[in-house]
Image (tube, rainbow, N blue to C red):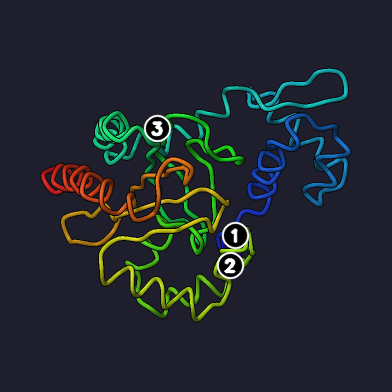
Amino acid sequence: MTPVRTPSAGYVQAFARGLSVIHSFGPDSPSQTLSQVAEATGLDRAGARRFLLTLENLGYVRREGRSFHLTPRILELGYSYLSTLPLRTIAEPIVRELVQEVNESSSISVLDGSDIVYIVRVPVKKIMTITLSIGSRVPAYCTAMGRVLLGGLPQKEIHLILKNSTITRYTRYTITSHPKIVKVIMADRAKGWSMCNQELEEGICSLAVPLTAGDGKAVAAMNITANLSRTTPSEMVSKFLPRLRKAAERINLSLRHR
């Protein structure tokens, strides 16, 4: 969950409401009626209708009978961000090489509020019940990449982000105690890598390291995710961590020389 910010003097409420209409569509609501959009966004029907018709006119929404759907053109909004990321261009071929080498999935994410957002993802096979792709968001506090990225922040900021997080026990292994999460993050920061063992989903273990720019600060995190039916956590550390670090260092060197 991204922390709610207090609107500034330059806040354009109409624009924010238009974005809320776009965000109301998702995996559980790919098609919505006018009434459903109004209910999901808190807008009245007249306001929701104006925003939907505007988005339709711009080509971001199409209408079929009483239902509205997003169009592929909406991807332009996300691509505008991705196309400005030199990290993604540099990293994706290296991630693909790593996946071929270890035969496990690998991803890169950045921190956004209390979530991590995937900007590169190369899966080898579907091993998780949740669907992860570029743009997917998951909580930082219970993921290896999230803890690596939180570990790159001042401790005061870590506490603030956790305070604004919705701490959920996803599995019996999920650490939900605020002090314990901070303790783990600090320990991971000291050793330079993080592992989350079945905290987001049972049977799934993830190992992550930071990606750093010229100033040494973490700008993203890179992981390897494996199914514990094939690989144990100790095997991941012994077999995968050296390879993950080597791939990350290749990306780091490229970032420093840009």
Q: Disc 2 vs disc 1: Cβ atoms closer than 8 Å?
A: yes
Identity of the residue drawn at 14% across and 49% down:
256
- Label 3, label 2: how far apart the Cα atoms are: 27 Å
Closest to the observer, 45 or 189: 189
- Label 3, label 1: how far apart the Cα atoms are: 24 Å
Identify whether 77 is placed above or below 108.
Answer: above
- The residue wearing badge 1 is 1
Identity of the residue drawn at 62% across and 63% down:
172
Identity of the residue drawn at 36% across and 52% down:
207
In the image, what residue type sits under mark 3? Val
Rendering coords of residue 66 (x, y %): 88, 24
In the image, what residue type sits under mark 2? Ser
| Image quadrant in which the C terminus is located | top left
Rendering coords of residue 24 (x, y %): 72, 42
Of the image marks 3 and 2, the number of the one nearer the N terminus:
3
Rendering coords of residue 135 (x, y %): 50, 40
Q: Residue furthest top?
A: 64
Tag shown at residue 122: 3
- Label 2, label 1: how far apart the Cα atoms are: 6 Å
Identify whether 234 is placed above or below 51.
Answer: below
In the image, what residue type sits under mark 1? Met
Neighbourhood count class around disc 1 (C-alpha, 10 Å): few under 14, some 14–19, many 20 upward: some
Neighbourhood count class around disc 2 (C-alpha, 10 Å): few under 14, some 14–19, many 20 upward: some
Secondary structure state at the residue bearing disc 2: loop
Secondary structure state at the residue bearing disc 1: loop
Closest to the observer, 68 or 53: 68
Neighbourhood count class around disc 3 (C-alpha, 10 Å): few under 14, some 14–19, many 20 upward: many
Of the image marks 2 and 1, the number of the one nearer the N terminus:
1
Identity of the residue drawn at 21% across and 49% down:
242
- The residue wearing badge 2 is 165
Rendering coords of residue 190 (x, y %): 26, 72
Is label 3 or label 2 in front?
3
